[in-house]
Image (cartoon, grey):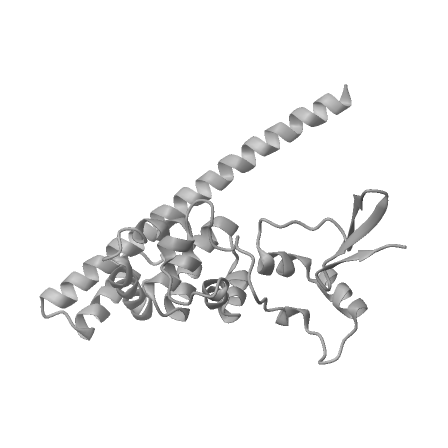
Amino acid sequence: MNNNLDLNFNEIINMIEARRNNAYKKVNEELISLYWDFGKYISEKVNDSNWGNKIVDKLVNFMQREYPTMKGFNRRGIYRMKQFYETYKDYPNVSPLVTQISWTNNLIILSSTNTIEEKEFYIKMCIKNNYSKRELDRQIGSGYYQRYMLSDGKANQSLAKVEGDEDYPNTRILDTYSLEFLDLPNQYSEKDLKKAIISNMKDFVLEIGKDFTYVGEEYRVQVGNEDFYIDYSDSHIIPIF
């Protein structure tokens, strides 16, 4: 009886959390849309009239007076919104995606990437993997996009060729991985590597791709009458005699 009650309570929790997540996504979508529209407004005014720094400063004062609780509408923030709009306005395949990630992650991608292809790549990674600021920072800082593009030996291929539904960012097996977060010395043992990976399992799984999962330090497979263990530390199968 108690087990059934617990199950029902868990279902209620799931319903509440699902609605909370939906509400957050909707609020975030509206906020990013506001920043987009505001950036468009500023861009058009600056480009088509005599708007300059003095008028922008007056706008900042107006926003602070009329909407004192709204964050981000200082001079720097307003010009970021302008840059945000101008960066994506000519890319109809990318612009709808920006509302699906946080403003913080949008700003990181805006300032830390070079090409529109690289920006699109990291936006899609954020959507797929629900990256935090720290996770996104690490992936960009480790050059994940460059390693991804080079993973099949073709440096200049387009995103359209590598990002279908069956091949989304962070799903391909890379040729090289960046494991600087393990903080290992120059000389280390296999045991040290195993311990470091286990201690940093979340970052390790993010690096190799979210379609992987952790099943143990060594995973036993049986071939015929022999047992073998897949060992992730040195990427080969170790026979057990």
Q: Tell me the quarter of the image containing the N terminus.
A: top right
Nearest to the observer: residue 110 or residue 61 = 110
Give the residue furthest to the front.
224
Residue 236: in sight, yes or no?
Answer: yes
Residue 69: in sight, yes or no?
Answer: no
Give the residue furthest to the left.
49
Q: Quadrant of residue 24?
A: top left
Q: Position of residue 190 (x, y in %)?
A: 78, 68
Nearest to the observer: residue 170 or residue 229 = 229
Nearest to the observer: residue 131 or residue 52 = 131
Say left or right for 65 vs 166: left
In the figure, 209 relative to 49: above or below? Answer: above
Q: Quadrant of residue 25?
A: top left
Nearest to the observer: residue 148 or residue 51 = 148
Q: Position of residue 63 (x, y in %)?
A: 27, 60
Residue at x 79%, y 73% (from the top left corner):
189
Q: Position of residue 13 (x, y in %)?
A: 61, 33
In the figure, 78 relative to 4: above or below? Answer: below
Give the residue furthest to the top.
1
Give the residue furthest to the right.
241
The number of discs equals 0
Residue at x 15%, y 67% (from the top left corner):
46
In the figure, 154 relative to 101: above or below? Answer: below
Say left or right for 78 vs 131: left
Q: Tell me the quarter of the image containing the C terminus.
A: bottom right
Residue at x 14%, y 69% (from the top left corner):
51
